[in-house]
Amino acid sequence: MNGRLCEGRVVIVTGGGRGLGRAHALALAAEGATVVVNDLGVTLDGSAPDGCPAAAVVDEIGRSGGRAIASTDDVATWTGAQCLIRGAVDAFGRLDGLVCNAGTLLDRDLVDMSESNWDSVITTHLKGHAAPLHHAARHWRAVAEQTGDSTGGRVVLTASTAGIWGDAGRTNYNAAKAGIVLLGRTAAIELARDGVCVNVIAPFARTRMTISLDAGLAAAPTPDRFDPVDPANASPLVVWLCSDESAGVNGEVFEVHAGHLGIVQPPRRGPHVEVDHRWLPAELGAAVDGLLASRPAAR
Ligand SMILES: NC(=O)c1ccc[n+]([C@@H]2O[C@H](COP(=O)([O-])OP(=O)(O)OC[C@H]3O[C@@H](n4cnc5c(N)ncnc54)[C@H](O)[C@@H]3O)[C@@H](O)[C@H]2O)c1
């Protein structure tokens, strides 16, 4: 069993009971990781309990000869996230990777958005990524200070192309995902001193989340043909980012779907113009027209 990419590593996958998270958990276990499969088990909009998917994935990993334990902690609370990180370290004596993936969907146009629609999605995604990352970071900082060594910790956060390029109908989700990109880039800078790499993925796959938006995705894949929307298509990148091999890759944002792998450039300053005085309102129309005309295409 030697030579597997994550042999001996302990990795947490949040929202690991279904969809993309389940695929990541299975792939990590197949590459030798001991996996903590975390899933609160909630409906797509997060409003009600919906089974024990984490336990089912743990059983699946066990049947394939892998090692996993289940967690039903709510990662969108500071205490739930703390229990998750502590539980992994108490059970296995170490933590090597954290894949933040848990999420819910409650799409609304901005004009129809209620305060609870907004809070629910921002909390599950943005706080649900920040809270486990905070507690994992504290763990790795303590290990680095105790041993004086690089921890080799790895973090994968889950954004979305919708939170990078934007689209209509889900301002809560897109704002949360955009926040996750900056959470990742900032944590990558802060945690580099502990030898922790933090990267972000923007996947696309057939899961209950995307089937709720496009029922056509529910169609069964063609047997013996590459399935471009299989959630497992994103998992090899997650496995690699959780391994030692990805040392030095830090603060990146990857687009991954089907056979596509790309990196998203950080925002860059565009064209600019300067004058030697405070701008006058009357000058700005021509100045802005000039800047817009000279900027490169958005993507
Ligand atoms: N499916 C896609 O194409 C796609 C595209 C871009 C981004 N994403 C992101 O990928 C991630 C996984 O999405 P999916 O499509 O597999 O959805 P999914 O609904 O199949 O899985 C999400 C899982 O998260 C769990 N969860 C929700 N709130 C939780 C909480 N507070 N604590 C612990 N677990 C919780 C749910 O029970 C569920 O099992 C999400 O962050 C989603 O926004 C998905």
Image: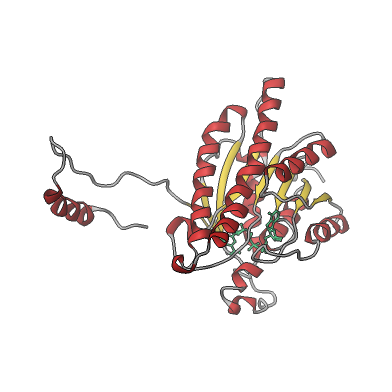
Q: Residue at x 57, y 60 (%)?
A: 116
Locate residue 239 relative to residue 86 in the image: left or right. left
Q: How many marks?
A: 0
Which scheme is used to colour this image of the protein? Answer: secondary structure
Report if residue 161 is visible in the image.
Answer: no
Where's residue 36, x and y in %?
Answer: 78, 48
Q: Is residue 229 above or below residue 35?
A: below
Of all residues, the one furthest to the front in this rendering is 115
Where's residue 34, x and y in %?
Answer: 80, 45
Locate residue 245 relative to residue 79 in the image: left or right. left
Locate residue 268 relative to residue 55 in the image: left or right. left
Q: Residue at x 54, y 32 (%)?
A: 190
Q: Residue at x 52, y 64 (%)?
A: 114
Indicate the quadrant of ligand 1 in the picture: bottom right
**Observer-nearest of 156 and 241:** 156
Where's residue 235, x and y in %?
Answer: 66, 56
**Observer-nearest of 166 and 120:** 120
Where's residue 20, x and y in %?
Answer: 66, 60
Report if residue 160 is visible in the image.
Answer: yes
Locate residue 154 relative to residue 122 in the image: left or right. right
Q: Is residue 37 above or below residue 243?
A: below
Q: Quadrant of the C terminus?
A: bottom left
Q: Residue at x 39, y 47 (%)?
A: 267
Residue 81: name its quadrant.
top right
Residue 193: name its quadrant.
top right
Q: Is residue 280 above or below residue 149?
A: below
